Image (cartoon, grey):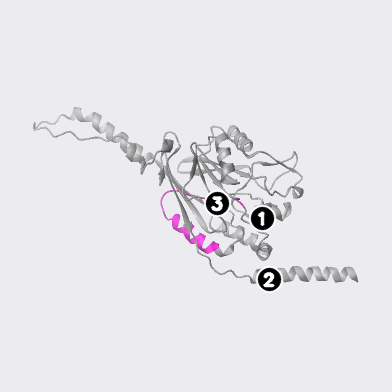
Amino acid sequence: MTWGKRGQTSLNVADRLPRYVRAVASAAPRIDIVRFIPVFIFLLTVISLVVSAMSFTILYTNDIHNRLGSLASLSALIERERVNDAPVLLFDSGDTWQDFRVPLYAVWGADEMVAWMNRVNYDAMAIGNHDLYYGADKLAELSSKADFPVLCSNMVPFAGEQAPYAPYTIIDAAGMQVLVVGVITAEYLSYPDYPWLEYVDPAQAIKRILDEMRGKYDFVIVLGHLPMAQAVLIARSVPDIDVFLTGHSHEVTPQPVKQGKTLIVQAGAFGQYLGRLKLEIDPESREVASAQNSLLKTKKTPVDLDRGFVKVFAVVALIATSLFLLIR
């Protein structure tokens, strides 16, 4: 299904352009070239509009939770999508580096996840509440290893403090300046580990950045580690958002949820899907003229857990040695 402006369905931007219908040829042999000048101008205008139409693809993941068995399949799907000529942006909406439900993965999985995200060239990632559970030092370490911006705009450090993430980034895509903003839900946040951060309402944080950056962007993408329902409410309050990539609630959206002009999507959890949102942008308004969303199913592959066991044994040995020395 393809979304058009004002909720209309459209197969292609060109379908809405005016058509030139050729007149029946005259029997007179003389050709009046002057008569056809307006026709030529009209055709050139139509061709220029079609050629200048901008398109790009957004690939998105969320809540992978260190499920390393999905990474090989995700890599193959991402590589396949990048074969196309149109620009491809790759984003993640958080809860990617941690999952306490699988303790063995937590021993070394986060470093593997960051290394994989670097290899497949993510453009940006939002922080999720699980990603905060490692504590400030580990979060800073992981963020420093990432070759892409790690984003959160609504956990604001107090004066004099610095967070290991940025509130937003700007990416050039299809000749447009794309403003990408990260936000996080207040649910299950580990406040005691971050006493130097203040939680701000996501809508307020996004509005502040849009006002601050006004005139410096053409298109707005929000990476929100928060449920679909909350994203809908934010989109009502902040109507300038073009695309809202969500997470946290492990929902799937075969078709985007549309709130105003905002397209809201989510790709389930645990790397089961790679989300793909193909956009065609109106060259004058810089708004979405048509959009096609798909959830590409991944396959699981066996994971070598040896590294995890080795690290567990090393930690246990270190603890045992420390206790032995203390007892003596």
- Name of the residue lying farthest toward the top: 34
Proximity of marks 3 and 2: CB atoms separated by less than 8 Å = no
Q: Amino acid at mark 2?
A: Phe
Q: Toward the viewer: 303 or 168? A: 303
What is the spatial separation of the Cα atoms under label 3 and label 2, in whole angstroms?
Answer: 32 Å
Percent x, y of residue 174: 45, 43
| Disc 2: which residue | 309
On screen, residue 212 versus residue 327, left or right, reads left
Q: Is residue 282 visible?
A: no
Q: Toward the viewer: 227 or 63? A: 227
Query: Mark 1 or mark 2, which is nearer to you?
Result: 2
Magenta part of the protein: which range? 70-94
Q: Earlier in the sequence, mark 1 or mark 2?
A: 1
| Picture quadrant where residue 321 is located | bottom right
Q: Amino acid at mark 1?
A: Leu
What is the spatial separation of the Cα atoms under label 1 and label 2, in whole angstroms?
Answer: 21 Å
| Disc 1: which residue | 142
Residue at 58% over, 49% down: 247
Query: SS at mark 3?
Result: loop
Q: Amino acid at mark 3?
A: Glu
